[in-house]
Image (cartoon, grey):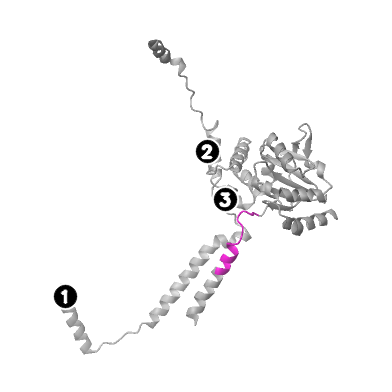
Amino acid sequence: MNRFLIPFGVFVVVVGFLAVGLTLNPRELPSPLVGRPAPDFSLPQLHDQGKVLSSNDLKGKVWLLNFWASWCGGCKEEHPVLIHLAQSGEVPIYGMDYKDTREEALAWLKQWGNPYPIVAVDALGRVGINYGVYGVPETYVIDKAGVIRYKQIGPLREDILQEKILPLVRELQNQ
Amino acid sequence: MRWLLAIILLIPGLAVAEEAKPLADNPVAEARLKALAVELRCLVCQNQTLADSNAPLAEDLRREVREMIAKDMSDQEIIDFLVERYGDFVLYRPRWKVSTTLLWLGPFLLLIAGATALVLALRRRQKKLVDVALSEEERTRVAQLLSEGANRL
């Protein structure tokens, strides 16, 4: 009896490990920044280069920070979701134009629509590094005290928005 | 006309070549960057080191590390800077933590388990071996067979 039970037990354990391990997405890395203050930035604005968008200006409200670029395919994919969210007016989405050229970024927004009240320009990707960005699009939920509460890696989808982000945003807004 | 052209081409000043640029202004800093970059993972192409990768993010991170080296930060400070932003995943050599204990000790545990199982199995098998007493008749038969075998050689 033992002869079969032991290998069978080992087999079940290995299958269990594989079942979990192989279905994890290696691209989704837990961010160490969730629960920590959002890195400060102060960057020129895309539409009005003379003006600056600073993270300090956004203290006191719940906001989303969306890293995007005109060269990024996933950004196109999530764009309708952002537009929809912007129209609902539930939470402002601030854009961070990541390693992009100004002309192309402006043209992109003109063509597909602009969900952002303000877009900041991170031409060298330095703010991206401070936020631990390793692939656009990435979206952060930041609370009234300026703490990162959630990080979305990859394109936003309507279901993620409805199930995770909006409930979190409402909860944070009521705090 | 052809001669004139040949003479013009022979003027050495026309073939000015610039000396090859060194890879870095500071070879010591570059060596440190290299040593650090093989310990760090490129987040985009996850199984390459920061040194191997050509991804734009890897280039940016190398630039960042280079600047930190120029600012005279220690290796540990530079690694902490990256871990703070990208998590432990950026390290090729995982840190000793509660969550990585199994990772570090697992192979040794498996080795101990395997060795124990082997010793137990061998002992059990040894017990199963029983000395078989040979009768006189069998002994002579063995001797006969062995000598036959020797002759055959």
Q: Which residue is mark 2?
A: B31
Q: Secondary structure at mark 2?
A: helix
Report whether B124 appears left or right of A60: left
Label 1: state its secondary structure: helix
Look at the numbered disc 3 and give the secondary structure of its residue.
Answer: loop
Residue B26 in which image quadrant: top right
Chain letter of mark 2 equals B
Quadrant (top left/top right/bottom left/bottom right) for the C terminus of chain A: bottom right
**Looking at the image, can residue A142 be seen?**
no
Q: Is residue A140 above or below residue B104?
A: above
Give percent across and percent down for residue B142. Answer: 21, 83
Closer to the camera: disc 3 or disc 1? 3
Residue B123 in the image: state x and y as whole percent. 42, 77
Q: Amino acid at mark 3?
A: Gln
Say the numbered circle drawn on residue B150. Answer: 1
Q: Earlier in the sequence, mark 3 or mark 2?
A: 2
Residue drawn at the location 53% of the way across and 35% of the way down: B28
The magenta stretch spans residue A28:
yes
Residue at the disc numbered 3: B46
In the rendered structure, which segment of residues is drawn in magenta?
A: A15-29
- Which of A92 and A76 lies nearest the eye of the viewer? A76
Specify whether B41 is left or right of A152: left
